[in-house]
Amino acid sequence: MITVVGSINLDLIATVDRLPKPGETVPGDAFTTSPGGKGANQALAARRSGADVRMVGGVGRDSFATEALACLRDGGVDLSGVRESHAATGVALIFVEESGENVITIVPGGNGALFPGDVASADIRKGEYVMLQLEVPLETVGAALAATRSVGATSLLNTAPFRAEAAPLLGEADYVIANETEFDLYSNALSLTGDSREQRMLDFAGRTGRIMVVTLGAEGVVAATASELVRAQGLTITPVDTVGAGDTFCGYFAASLELGLPLQDALRRAAVAGSLACLKPGAQPSIPRGEDVEEALKGG
Ligand code: RIB
């Protein structure tokens, strides 16, 4: 079982030829809505990978909630841990330009009303996996990390979006997953030492005994354990839309570890899934099915 404690959003997406500069207006080509939120995306990715998944999150009592939860519900994610609050359902305002580059603003709404008590009711058990991100209150993330450790479950913390005040939480997770920008920012916040990013990753892993995973976009992914670096590549692709690719990586990585895959294989499977997620627009609609990932893995 994988429990995801995290955000649920409705993504409001405009596609544009190029992203506007501050103060500039650009015409949009198309507008769509799509279920999103880093937590929900990761939950769906783990589910599409084949895992049993439980979502712990918060939505509003509004029509956006129904749409935001539609893919999770259809996909068979257990939604008994999703609570309604008086806040509106979280939204993400997303611009995607032709190159696939994007900018996102999130308005947390009900995600901000997810509290440590919601984690306590999730009944996390020994041997399970718990996936976390930083789009919900940090005290809730901290409570989930503590609960995971106390029962003998395994935690994975995705450090997105960067929040300087979250730096002390990184050493509390069994696996930390960051992109390059986030890792460099947390490196400074944690005063990690070393002349290169990889040395600083090893410094983190050596100090904490945790595994640090850094995604490198087209360059694949690298992980540091206390004793070594492990690398894996995704697919060579031309991205259409990278929204949700990092979440796909996280969900597939958690599910692959839960399956018992060794670190190298889990990284490779997750990186391939992340590559496939860049080939379609939208966060959740682009998350690949397990069989497509296996097919791509066989293809090399
Ligand atoms: O990581 C992508 C997600 O970030 C989007 O689905 C959006 O909701 C934001 O939370």
Image (cartoon, rainbow, N blue to C red):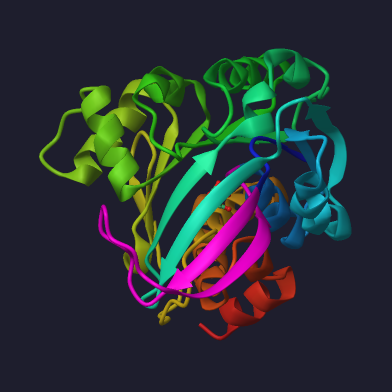
Residue at (25, 31) in percent of width and height: 187
Q: Is 257 rendered above or below residue 111?
A: below
Give the image location of residue 173, x and y in percent.
52, 27
Looking at the picture, tell me which residue is in the foreground, 117 or 227. 117
- Nearer to the camera, 100 or 124: 100
Q: Residue 65: percent from the left, percent from the top? A: 78, 45
Location of residue 198 (image quadrant) = top left
Residue pushed farthest bottom? 299
Image side of residue 91 versus residue 233, left or right: right
Seen at 68% across and 22% down, the residue is 113
Q: How many marks?
A: 0
Locate residue 237: give its quadrant: bottom left
Q: Is residue 187 magenta?
A: no
Q: Residue furthest left?
A: 195
At 37% from the left and 66% from the top, the residue drawn is: 101
Q: Tell me, yes or no, if residue 79 can be seen here.
A: yes
In the rendered structure, which segment of residues is drawn in magenta?
Answer: 10-38
Q: Nearer the viewer, residue 7 or 181?
A: 7
Quadrant, the N terminus? top right
Question: Residue 9, how many percent across, how many down?
Answer: 65, 46
Residue under the image location 46 percent in, 46 percent down: 105
Q: Is residue 224 above or below residue 58?
A: below
Q: Position of residue 91 (x, y in %)?
A: 61, 45
Up the image or down, 220 lies above or below 87; here it is below
Q: Is residue 30 magenta?
A: yes
